[in-house]
């Protein structure tokens, strides 16, 4: 049982990490657009 739980946790952390990277890229693009407007 413990092995299954650790595998699930690893998958969840990987998914969260990917989402974080996507959000960071979106924030960077938004900041660049804001600076261009200024």
Image (spheres, rainbow, N blue to C red):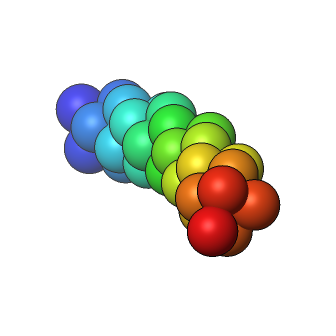
Q: Residue at x 52, y 45 (%)?
A: 23
Q: Quadrant of residue 12?
A: top left
Residue 15 x, y percent position in the rendering? 50, 34
Residue 35 at x, y percent in the picture: 67, 68
Tell me the quarter of the image containing the N terminus: top left
User: Is residue 32 among the parts visible in the rendering?
Assistant: no
Q: Is residue 31 above or below residue 12?
A: below
2 and 7: which is toward the camera: 7
Residue 34 falls in image quadrant: bottom right
Report the front residue among 24 and 13: 24
- In this image, 34 relative to 36: left or right? left
| Residue located 59% across and 50% down the image | 30
Looking at the image, can residue 23 be seen? yes
In the rendered image of this protein, does residue 24 appear above or below residue 1? Answer: below
- Residue shown at 35% from the left, 43% from the top: 9
Image quadrant holding the C terminus, namely bottom right
Relative placement, left or right, of 20 versus 29 is left
Q: Position of residue 19 (x, y in %)?
A: 51, 38
> How many numbered discs?
0
Nearest the eye: 3 or 38 = 38
In this image, 19 relative to 33: left or right?
left
- Looking at the image, the residue that sits furthest to the front is 38
**Nearest to the observer: residue 4 or residue 26:** 26
């Amino acid at each position: 049982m413990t092995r299954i739980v650790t595998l699930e946790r690893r998958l969840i952390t990987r998914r969260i990490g990917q989402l974080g990277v996507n959000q960071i890229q979106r924030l960077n693009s938004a900041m660049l657009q804001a600076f261009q407007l200024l």
